[in-house]
Every structure is written in C-alpha cells, then in structure tokens.
Amino acid sequence: MKPTYAFRFFFEWGNSGECLWPDNLAARERFGFAPSIEDFPVSEELKANVHRVGEWYQTNLNWDYPPDPGPWRQDECDRFNRAVQELFGDLVRELGPDYELEYRQTVLTEDTDLDEYLKDPAHFKGKG
C-alpha cells in the first residue's frame, strides 16, 4: 500500500520550523505548500527538535553577504549532518506508514575559502 502523503525533507534559509515540503497532491491539499512542523502529528519533543535543528541550520549562512563563506568549520558541519539524519529518522518513525519522506538535505561541508575570508572579510574576493 502506497503512503497517503509524500514529502521532501530539507531545511531552507529563513525557515527554521519548516523542513517537510509537500511532494504530492494529497500532501499539498492537506498541509499547503509550506507547512510548519506544528501541523504534523508528532510529539512536542520532536517539534522542538525540528525548530532547534532548523535554527542551527540558519547559523551556517553568512547573513551579511550570503555568497561569502559561512562560519562553520568541518566539525560543526559533521555534527549538524549527524543531527539532521537523526531528526529525519525520528520523523519517519513518528509519522508512520501514511507518510513517505524523501531525504533531500544537502550535506554541509566547510567552505574551502573560509580561512581566506577570515583573514580580511571586508576585502574578500570569492572564486565565483
């Protein structure tokens, strides 16, 4: 039996409580195009964890000038990548068989230009 609701799972900049993006008509009709985790039948603990991980994700972007390197070193990228995989597993378990989730979160890595950027952020010229 095919699940009723299909979603893509990933965080986006500016949305700390949204990580499930409808991927079929039934999901869009029931939840809209950008549902909050508050709309889903999961525990309050899991909802809080979605917000925590989503807010953490927001700190990886250089908000002063997004094309420049973000501040995370590889060890923080690795911690985030593990946390988001665990979060995904928790969502799959709590949502159950009526929901199909596709993991689409980008694996984060330290920007290769971070050291150069940190030497002089005001005069940094990226490779792009």
Image (cartoon, rainbow, N blue to C red):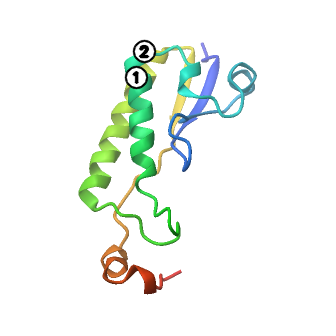
Q: CA distance from mark 2 to mark 1?
A: 5 Å
Question: In the rendered view, would you say 95 is above or below 105?
Answer: above
Left-right relation of 68 to 77: right
User: Could you say which disc has been placed on residue 43 in the image?
Assistant: 2
* Rendered location of residue 54, percent (x, y): 45, 40
Q: Residues within 10 Å of mark 2 (few under 14, many from 20)?
A: few
Pointer 2 and pointer 1: residues touching (CB < 8 Å)? yes
- Amino acid tagged 1: Leu
Residue type, mark 2 in image: Ser
- The quarter holding residue 51 reads top left
Answer above or below: position of 18 versus 6.
below
The N terminus sits in image quarter = top right
Which circle marks residue 124 in the picture? none
Q: Quadrant of residue 119?
A: bottom left
Q: Position of residue 68 (x, y in %)?
A: 47, 72
Query: What residue would you read off at disc 1?
Result: 46
Can the viewer see residue 82?
A: yes
